[in-house]
Image: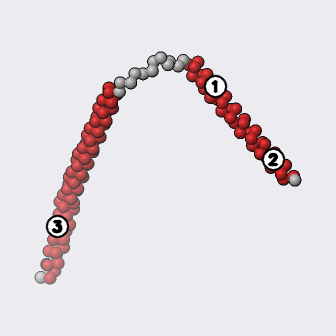
Amino acid sequence: KREQQLAIRKKAKKIANLVMKEFWVPCEKVVQEKNKIKINHRKHELLSKKRDMVVDEVNKITTLFVKELKEDKTPLDVSHNNTQEDLIKSETNEDTTQTSDNRMESDDHKEQNDQMETNDDQ
């Protein structure tokens, strides 16, 4: 009788393991895949909402910008057309001014160094 019970238990255990491997494990995989699909769908919805909000905000800013440009009635200064030559001349003048400034600073530093050497000698 005891041997029969052990044999029945072994068969029951094999059947339980078989049911677990063949039925419940695939069911669990299906449930996990469904949950992944739901999560991905929710992420997609949230990203779509965020994208729509950004697009709306950009549209608002663009509308305000266009409105301001239309309201801005100040005429462009057409009478002051700079040619390339004028631009080159102005850049050259700026460079010349900077160079002369640098020379003056250099001369000042030389004078200070000379004075310091003279003081050190005394």
Q: Secondary structure at mark 1?
A: helix
Q: Specify whether 96 is left or right of 53.
A: right
Residue that mark 2 sits on = 115
Judged by depth in the image, the label closer to the viewer, 1 or 2, is: 2
Q: Residues within 10 Å of mark 1 (few under 14, many from 20)?
A: few
**x%, y% of residue 20?**
19, 64
The amino acid on which the numbered mark 3 sits, given as a three-letter code, is Ile
Under tag 3, what secondary structure? helix
* Marks 3 and 1, how far apart at CA: 95 Å
Q: Amino acid at mark 1?
A: Thr
Percent position of residue 104, x then y: 72, 36
Which residue is located at x 14 percent, y 78 percent? 5
Callout 3: few (<14), some (14-19), or many (20+) C-alpha neighbours within 10 Å?
A: few
Q: Tell whether label 1 touches label 3 (CB within 8 Å).
A: no
Q: Which residue is mark 1?
A: 92
Q: Which residue is mark 3?
A: 15
